[in-house]
Amino acid sequence: MKKNSAKIHPDHGVHKKRLNRVRGQIDGIEKMIDERRYCPDILIQLRAASKALESIEAEIMQTHILGCVKTAMKSRDEKEVSKKVGEIMTLVRR
């Protein structure tokens, strides 16, 4: 992802803390695999980690829309608005 030093990006510190929690979950899942734990138990933990990541993703998307996209729309700069909409569409299609 490109960085633009001329613009201020939001602080995602709260998301970083949550990512650290997910990292802990992943470490726990690896340990479960090493211990040859019951497959459904591993799958439950995988699903929990996946959902946690989806939640973080949704919050960052919302921050982007309410911040960057909203700012572009208020500027009435059609090129910038199109760029922001294109970014979101690219993300949604992935």
Image: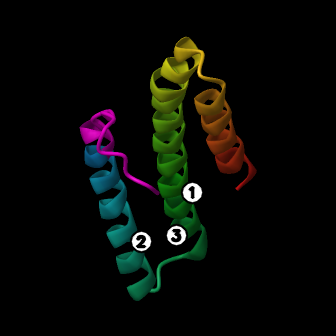
Sequence-wise first label, 2 or 3 = 2
Q: Give the range drawn in magenta.
A: 1-15
What colouring style does the render use?
rainbow
Q: Residue at x 51, y 40 (%)?
A: 55
Tell me where residue 3 appears, x and y as whole percent: 37, 51
**Residue 57 numbered tag:** none
Q: Which residue is drawn at 47% across and 28% down?
A: 68
Tell me where residue 50 appears, x and y as whole percent: 54, 55
| Neighbour tally class for label 3: few under 14, some 14-19, many 20 plus, Cα within 10 Å | some
**Residue 42 numbered tag:** 3
The quadrant holding residue 15 is top left
Tell me where residue 92 appears, x and y as whole percent: 70, 45
Residue where numbered disc 1 is placed: 47
Q: How far apart are marks 3 and 1 (CA)?
A: 9 Å
Residue where numbered disc 2 is placed: 29
Sequence-wise first label, 2 or 1 = 2
Q: Does the magenta stretch include residue 4?
A: yes
